Amino acid sequence: MKLLLAGSALALLPFTTSAPALAQDETEKPATAGNIQTDVIVVTAARFGTIATDTLDTPEQVALPADTAALAARTPGGALVGNGGLSGQLAYRGLFGERVTGKVNGQRFATGGPNAMDPPLHYAPSILLERIEIARGVAPVSSGPGLAGAVNAVLLQQPFAQTSGTDASARFMAQYRSVDDSYAVGGLAGIANEHWRLGVIGSREQGEDYRFPGGTATGTSFERNLYGVQAGYRAAGGEFFLEYRRSETDPSGNPPFALDIVYFDTDFLQTGFKGELAKEVTLDVRLGHVAVRHLMDNQTLRQPAAPAASARATFADADSFTGEASLRFGSSNRHVRIGGDFELADKFVRITNPFNAGFFLDAQSNLAAERFGAFAELRSAMGAVEFELGGRIDHTSQDSGVPQLGSAVPMGPRMLANAFAASAREASDTSFDLVLRGWMPGEMITPRVTLARKVRVPSTLERFAWLPTEASYGLADGNIYVGNPALKPEVAYIAEAGFDLSAGALTFRPTLFYRRVDDYIQGTPFDATPGVVDSTVEMVSAMNGDPTPLMFRNVDAELFGVDLDFRAELGADLAIDGTASWVRGKRRDVDDNLYRVAPPNLRLAAIWSPGRWSLGAELQAAADQAKVSAANGESPSDGYVVLGLSGSFDLSERISLSAGVENLFDEYYQPHLSGLNRVADSDVALGERLPGAGRGVWMRISAGF
């Protein structure tokens, strides 16, 4: 179902729900609610679009974090994996990392950081967000492969005008937060008529180390710029579009990692067409390229900087070429869709010592992955039951080059590199996905059920990481990992059931879910004698401070739980919203809990908006998490309750002022999925979970012209 939080830069309330309805295209006029398959969180300053017709709705606000993953985590079943100011990830129903498909403006791409310092949402500044689309539970096969849900961050878009005359428009937003002395400014300016559109987008964000009750989290400052252009041409049959963006992340701290960001310089290019070729025949084509250039080190921001002997500067590149095309035969509610897509990714990672030119080694040497897929979807009905049935097949090929090492690299890594060079260094998999989703629209209640088989092929990191390092796609747990060429794909069997209730002023949407995952990939002890250094891998790992490395292996897992959201309008001026999530993750092959699963959590918000001004409050709470992984040495966490207040005032139909207080009672808390601190000169102890931000005020202005 499509859920819209119209109004301010970010709605205070987690969701605003409409009545259920049938799935439809975004370009078509909504029937009553939108798409039962997708949650859409609108976080734009206002849906100004064409200023003549759009109005500024009553603001419902919280402070915008720099990390868009924190906004996506507000979805039912969501949680934030906190790895620094710009490197968070969305955990969805107990799964995160590459199991959750991430896109920006519909474009899929390979991240550049070997430890996911730049997960997909890193490239979507919250100050520029128009909306976040999150697939409910199971992503449709047309969105590509992926084990869990899918998230797509849509940045501000210049719309077409409604008349033949040329109109100019602009949207602007600026925010200040005291807790990290940060500011963010951004916006979109453009011109358009009914046939063509042209827009320029840009943002600037900068923040210092954030404060928490008891001190300052050193090494959490951040800095990022984004700018780009977008264009579109619309004829009778459809629209051609072209967009380019440049994202530049400057020195930004990552306390859970051994290194900090020095830069990410990333270029996005995308073009495509969507339109009708004939009556009830629609073509959708998209081509894209993303180039990531990255440097991280333990010298620029890390306090204290590492001594010369252990100084490290790691260079990483990633290039992605993607394409997809589909044909839809029929209407939005009754159709057959067939299509195909491809994704070509190349990665390279070289570790160096900036004080020793002879020390360098290719931790990921010319990794290449090629995926080609095809899918088919049927949208129809059997009596009163609407359904969508889809299947896809993908073939993935992966390989690695031979790592190069400098003359100063010691013998241990040389032995591992030679053994890796003598191995096959290639793998291929053919995977099959199947999704069946059914629902029965009613005047008040829409029951729904989903059955699916979803597959995730191991990443090139999980298979070809020959050198023991902390690279783990953002687990940030201080462990050292090594790859495993023998990994098999993860296969998930999924069942979900729930209903959407819309009864006047009340909406309520609970969902029960179960995921049985065969060959789940997780770090396990390298051999049967952990702590006994009797292999080259363990010797190299011990040299790096961890004599107990982990190897990625296939295990068996299951995840089950329930999540929900609701909204109740108590009169014309008062509304209450909320979300609640509970997920349980267990190993099936041994008696243990699954690693890094969020505890039960709750969000409750209320807003009073009698006119041009509004007042709001939001409570965020999490329970203790004692169901932790013994095999991975995971520590339990304590529960917490945090309260925030906000207010806003509309100066006019086009300008709005907002302000609020975060963590009103200055509560000390440590979210369970926060990374562990690695910065020595910090008020956070080494190895402790990073705490949440303390009390602070924020102010924001939003305008559209």
Image (spheres, rainbow, N blue to C red):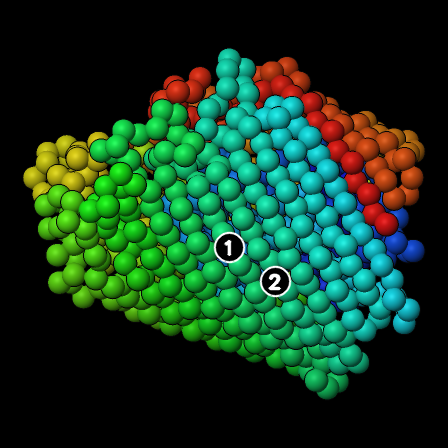
* Amino acid type at mark 2: Tyr
Is the residue 48 above or below the residue 71 in the image?
A: below
User: Which residue: 61% across, 50% down?
Assistant: 226
For the residues labelled 2 and 1, the Cα–Cα distance comes to 11 Å
Within 10 Å of disc 2 (Cα), the crowding (few <14, some 14-19, many 20+) is some
Q: Tag 2, which secondary structure? A: strand
Within 10 Å of disc 1 (Cα), the crowding (few <14, some 14-19, many 20+) is many
Q: Tag 1, which secondary structure? A: strand
Q: Nearer the viewer, residue 315 or 518?
A: 315
Q: Quadrant of residue 103?
A: bottom right
User: Which residue: 67% across, 50% down?
Assistant: 202
Counting residues from the N terminus, which is met first, the one under dot 2 or under dot 1? 2
User: Which residue: 39% across, 56% down?
Assistant: 317
Q: Percent position (x, y) of residue 4?
A: 74, 48
- Residues tagged 2 and 1 counted as in contact (Cβ below 8 A): no
Q: Nearer the viewer, residue 93 or 42?
A: 42
Is the residue 278 above or below the residue 129 in the image?
A: below
User: Which residue: 43% across, 62% down?
Assistant: 319
* Amino acid type at mark 1: Thr
Q: Percent position (x, y) of residue 660?
A: 73, 25
Is the residue 630 above or below the residue 279 in the image?
A: above
Task: Left or right? Give the position of 223 relative to 279.
Answer: left
Give the residue at mark 2: 244
Q: Nearer the viewer, residue 626 or 338?
A: 338
Give the residue at mark 1: 266
Is the residue 36 above or below the residue 273 in the image?
A: above
